[in-house]
Image (cartoon, helix red, strand yellow):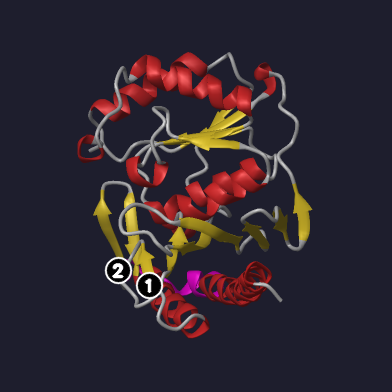
């Protein structure tokens, strides 16, 4: 067996093991929701909540993913980064869409991606697989680099682009109430009546999975962290979608993202660039 075949076989085993862990943690979160009380809910910033269940899920994911791949690093939404002593790094969001979770809405997710950082000193390595699990819908999305994407084991592909007047677009409201929010209000106003529907599902990982599955036609957002996006980016790429930043930067760096079919991506890119005349720096996003 040559090195490349052995590498792919290892990734397949790791993806299967990580999928089991992600599904298990997601089901635990689903069971725990009914027992949450107000005293364990914290507000990181207006409209952005975290609970002890987020942190407990993060701890469990770290422990179990590191047992699958000893020595690997972890970059997580809720916990301190672990550097690791090798070239593998897990990118983890233990509960994407906490507000939905607390409200009892179905769109929240556990998101995990594995990054190969072999030879990388700075910047991002290659995302080799990504998992997004929606526990209430019991959908586990898995994408492997160069091997396509599946939902509950069945291959999925981005659907054919719908006519613009029937497209359903989702977005994430900026966390700031300043210039980013004003700009997004302008974009939504401009799109209103030109597309079939504009939604705010409230879970970026879920929304990227729904676009990849053909149930949403596009998604755009700012104020995103890498853990929000990593697995969903690979899902988009492996289902034939277009995903990127309005100014050609890496969404994992900039926090801006557009996803969809090529015509929807271009529509959203133009709308965003018409409102935000230049690419905001990440430090200026708030």
Q: Is residue 262 left or right of residue 104?
A: right
Q: Position of residue 179 (x, y in %)?
A: 25, 26
Q: Position of residue 66 (x, y in %)?
A: 45, 81
Does the magenta segment cover residue 274? no
Pick the quarter of the image with the N terminus.
bottom right
Whether residue 69 is situated above or below residue 186 in the rendered picture = below
Q: Residue furthest right?
A: 154
Marks 2, 1: nearer the viewer? 1
Q: Position of residue 76 (x, y in %)?
A: 37, 65
Q: Kindly identify which residue carries mark 1.
A: 73
Q: Residue at x 49, y 82 (%)?
A: 64
Q: What segment carries the magenta color? A: 30-40
Q: Residue at x 74, y 44 (%)?
A: 157
Whether residue 144 is situated above or below residue 37 in the rendered picture = above
Whether residue 88 is situated above or below residue 206 in the rendered picture = below
Determine the secondary structure under disc 1.
Answer: strand
Q: Kindly identify which residue carries mark 2.
A: 81
Q: Residue furthest front?
A: 2
Pick the quarter of the image with the C terminus.
top left
Q: Is residue 153 left or right of residue 14?
A: right
Mark with earlier residue (2, 1) = 1
Q: Position of residue 252 (x, y in %)?
A: 39, 47
The reply to whether residue 99 is in sight is no
Image marks 2 and 1: residues in contact by CB distance under 8 Å: yes
Closer to the camera in the image, 76 or 5: 5
């Amino acid at each position: 067996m040559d090195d490349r075949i052995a590498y792919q076989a290892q990734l397949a085993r790791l993806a299967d093991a990580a999928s089991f862990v992600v599904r298990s943690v997601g089901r635990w979160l689903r069971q725990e929701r009914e027992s949450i009380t107000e005293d364990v809910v914290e507000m990181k910033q207006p409209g952005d909540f975290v609970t002890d269940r987020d942190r407990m899920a993060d701890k469990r994911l770290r422990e179990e993913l590191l047992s699958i791949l000893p020595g690997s690093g972890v970059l997580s939404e809720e916990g301190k980064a672990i550097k690791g002593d090798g070239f593998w790094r897990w990118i983890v969001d233990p509960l994407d869409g906490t507000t939905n979770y607390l409200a009892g809405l179905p769109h929240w997710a556990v998101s995990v991606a594995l990054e190969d950082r072999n030879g990388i000193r700075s910047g991002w390595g290659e995302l080799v697989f990504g998992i997004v699990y929606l526990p209430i819908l019991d959908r586990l999305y898995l994408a492997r680099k160069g091997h396509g994407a599946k939902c509950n084991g069945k291959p999925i592909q981005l659907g054919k682009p719908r006519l613009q007047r029937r497209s359903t677009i989702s977005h994430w409201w900026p966390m700031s109430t300043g210039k980013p929010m004003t700009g997004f209000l302008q974009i939504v106003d401009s799109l209103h009546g030109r597309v079939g529907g504009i939604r705010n599902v409230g879970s970026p990982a879920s929304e990227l999975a729904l676009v990849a599955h053909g149930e949403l036609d596009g998604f755009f957002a700012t104020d995103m962290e890498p853990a929000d996006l990593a697995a969903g980016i690979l899902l988009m790429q492996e289902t034939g979608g277009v995903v990127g930043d309005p100014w050609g930067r890496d969404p994992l760096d900039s926090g801006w993202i557009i996803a969809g079919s090529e015509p929807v991506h271009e529509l959203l890119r133009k709308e965003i660039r018409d409102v935000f005349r230049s690419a905001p720096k990440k430090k200026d996003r708030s």
